[in-house]
Amino acid sequence: MADAAPTESLEELAHRFRQEAEAVSDRAQYDALRVAWVGKKQGVLRSLMGRMKEVPPSERRDYGQAVNRLKTEVEKGLQALAARLEDADRQQALKGASVDVTLPGRQPDLGTLHPLTRVVAEMEEIFAELGYSVAEGPEVESDFHNFEALNFPPDHPARDTQDTFFVKGSSHQDGRQDLVLRTHTSPVQIRTMLSRRPPIRVICPGRVYRNDNDLRHSPMFHQIECLAIDEGITVGDLKGTLEAFIQRLFSPDTGVRLRPSYFPFTEPSAEVDITCPFCGGTGITPGTNDPCPVCSGTGWMEILGAGMVDPRVLLACDIDPDRYSGFAFGLGIDRVAMIRYGVPNIRMLFDSDLRLLRQIQG
Amino acid sequence: MKLSYQWIAEAVDLPEGVDEVARRLTAAGLAVENQEEVGEDVALDVDITTNRPDCMNHLGMAREAAVLFGRELRRPQAQSEAGGAPTAEVATVSIEDPEQCRRYVAWAVRGVTIGPSPQWIVDRLELLGLRSVNNVVDITNYVLWECGQPLHAFDLAKLRGADEQGPAEIVVREARDGETLTTLDGEARELKAGMLIIADASGPIGLAGVMGGADSEVTDSTVDVLLESAYFDPRPVRRTASALGMHTDASHRFERGADPELCAWAAQRAAALLVEVAGGEISESPVDAYPAPFEERAIELSQRRLEAFAGARFEREQVEAWFRGLGFGIERTSSNERNDPADSDEQGARWTVTVPSWRYLDMERVEDLYEEVIRLYGYDAIEATLPALSGHDGNTSAVYRRGMAARRHLAACGLAETVHFAFQDAAVDGRYPGVFQQGQPGAGPAVELVNPLSDLYRVMRRSLVPGLLGASLYNQRRGASAVKIFEIGHVFLALEENSSLTGVPVDERETLAVARGGVIGNDWQGEKELDFFDLKGVVESLFSTFAVTLQVRPAAVAREELVSGVAADLVVVEEAGEEQVVGYLGQILDAEDLPFPLFVAELETAALVPEGDRFSGLRVTPPSRFPGVGADLTLTHSLDVPFAEILAVVHGLKLEDLADVQLVSRYQGKGVPEGAVNTTLRFHYSSAEGSLTQDAVNARQSAVQQELSRRFAWSEGAG
């Protein structure tokens, strides 16, 4: 890397620079190269400029231009070389960097949806795909919507099973209270049928109230109601809709069993059982010989009530039962949430214990 | 209801065994919930729905089993040698209102010997959960459980007529106010008009269909017995029983519907058993008052319509066999043969079906007949289909959708959703009026329950906030250093008039409430003590994400539940400029022993749905192609100057190209006079036309500085 030999042509110098630049592997060599070629005192380019006066005047112009070209090439070469070294330094630095990836991440501060909300949202999604919308109604209801239009006449024994909360200051002439806390979401059926004409396909989620308070019962709980009214709706349609809904909600191999039953507002009516989601319907706790505690060893779990809408209910809502038929079913949302999340006691859903709520996922 | 398997099997051959019988009964709507071996027998616990009183006895269950297995039903003999004088010589019966008592059969058995029942009767009653009393009482119970007809046995000697020597005069009538009766259970009962009773010439001797009187009951010294076998209408029995808070095996059946055609048979059956067990002589004829005879009901049934309803095909002969087995009459009125079983337009058979007396209340419409066919055919056998979609059924309401979206938004903001009882202690509720306005026209008090679980649950809440406060305390006591929770639910206020929305006199609204307070995070994550502005930010983000313009203003009306200086109204400004208070925000005044301040907000969910064009608030401003220029400005001013005023002045200047102004810091302390604060704002200018020069921006900034200083600058005297 000495000074330019007088015998070297400019082309040879350019070639020599490229070779020397390629051989540079660290900062010190780079600095040396830079000084050797563009140094103010001894640099090759400096001395080439110094030789100008030795060049015959007629060639000076060409000589000057050639030296300038070489200068440009050297400067660009040095720049590229500097960038290459910088890059290498950075790579070198990253090679040494390290974090303990097992330290906890700083998570965004996320909250949680209540298990009931998650279950309702999922049910809504399933029914939306089947063409249903959501309908709502008040929780303080009239006797008409909660009972009478649903074919619970006054003094009917089926009213006894409803453990009704009555609201003060709303007495009928016969002394009955006209206002109640709705005991089921079925009054929303009535409100829906009174406010629109078939075809109707709605689900009605909401809070309901019964005067019943013990380890297994809460005086407030949640139901979801499904109602479909149209021409030509059959018992088979009810069964098919139940299967589609339940198998999506639990698993595709869930067994669904309908047992004839009685509700005043459906005819015929059915209790619907599903194969126990815990033991898969075997009745035996998986991996043991013990009876499944969830279904008491029966393999089945009663989960909802269903039926074909009673013609009296249709008539009460001014829908012609000779033309239209339909089905309705209702189930407890709390129960589904308890099954899904393994919550052992319904009251825990209303305790708002953040240690439980913070665990809710999916 | 417990029933004896052996007893059922006496009336029908059941070689399949108890498990299969239980399974088939369950599948047909008589759910056998439990089986328990009792000696040689099995007690079946059957859940019998209120519409099937005919199955609340052994013959009724045997009838079902016979149909399910295609067998014959054997009824026991009720005949016995009857030689005694006609009952009419010892008793007369009159019925005041045949609508309340359709039929009353009285049958005398004289010369019985009261004593213990034979062991087989004792055992059977015991399996059902009944205690043996004596042979006469046990037989009335036995026959009730055999065929479903409630019976009562009077001591004939204790019944009175107008003439001491004449026949007993039995009257079925309504009680009169002031009458009393001591019932068999020893309770003295005050009777009231409207209750249905049995009386003799001396007064009440029984509550019709509920319980007999103690004065006329059969005792060890009884010799002559008068058996009562009647049909009482469900309504008076239910009225009487519920007014007296009573529930008996008899009232349970009458309330659900007994069989008027069975009365005489049951009386005779009991009389025959009585003679067999206790000796004596049966009167040759009963008194049978039957002023309102059973009327047969016929219903037309079409095979085509039945099948269209069920979504299944049925054999004609099978349908007929089922109905006959259940005791219906069925006559084929047309029997169009079907050539193509797949062609459902063909008529198929038509029938006239007549309803048996024991199913009279349950079988009124053709749908009731469909149910019989479907339950015997089995839901299992019906093919599952999905309804064909026709038409459109309307939309889920915007408020509902907003509620669900708000839940997700709040969860994403770090809040946990909670659900609390809507019941509230009236005293607590009184302190938390929630979103309801003071002095709202037509508003009443809180909605109050007649039969609350306890005083703590007496009224329906007007606000969700007390629930959130309760949950905060609950969690803090369990070690939580911070609470960030919300609930969406209904709140209630009584109205004087019916609401036009719901038709009931209640103002019921859905609100959303949020509570935050305490210290979150730690040194590693970054620590933060939650304050008023953290909650305000959550509320603001909720409104802005739904494109609703919100203003937060100092509370216009004092709220007693909030710290007075830390209380604000949430005001929605509609497009037309109309303003509406939709909620509130502030710090809870009485947070009990919560060691940190709790900030709450409550607002109506409906306020999150923008009025008018729901798309207008969504439009964006395309960003400029040129980078903007920022500039900070610090103003020292009195703490009394609301930030909103400063901002209003800035906006009032309508500075060209001003894209955004943000608060960067508020500083009090060294270098700032007492009573003053340094507010630093960051301005951002951006133009769609081209790059802005720092000089152009500086000119605008000095205009702002000048105006703000003129209006608000701190001076010792002013502070």
Image: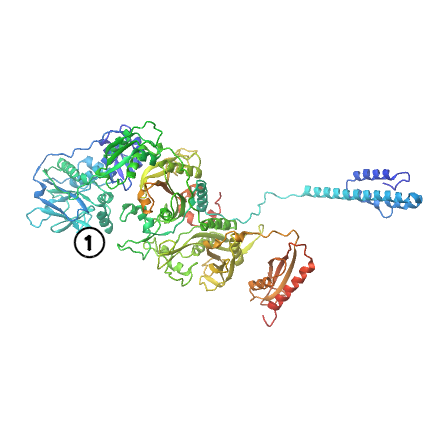
- Residue A211 in view in this figure: no
Q: How many labels does the image show?
A: 1
Viewer-closest of A111 and A181: A181
| Picture coordinates of residue B361, whole percent (x, y) | 24, 42
Viewer-closest of A304 and B431: A304
Q: In this view, does B56 lie to the left or right of A342?
A: left
Q: Is residue B678 above or below residue A165?
A: below
Q: In this view, does B370 lie to the left or right of B162?
A: right
Q: How crowded is mark 1: few (under 14 residues within 10 Å), some or many (20 or more)?
A: few
The image's colour scheme reads: rainbow
| Picture coordinates of residue B581, whole percent (x, y) | 47, 60
Please give the chain letter of the residue carrying mark 1. B
Residue that extends furthest to the top in the rendered view of this protein: B339
- Residue A289 in view in this figure: yes
Residue visible at 29% across and 29% down in the picture: B336
| Picture coordinates of residue B401, whole percent (x, y) | 46, 48
Q: In this view, does A143 lie to the left or right of B276?
A: right
Q: In this view, does A255 lie above or below B515?
A: above
- The residue carrying mark 1 is B193
Q: What element carries label 1?
A: loop
| Picture coordinates of residue B432, whole percent (x, y) | 42, 59
**What amino acid is labelled 1 in the image?**
Ala
| Residue A234 image-quadrant placement | top left
Q: Quadrant of the N terminus of chain A?
A: top right
| Residue B451 image-quadrant placement | bottom left
Residue that extends furthest to the left in the rendered view of this protein: B165
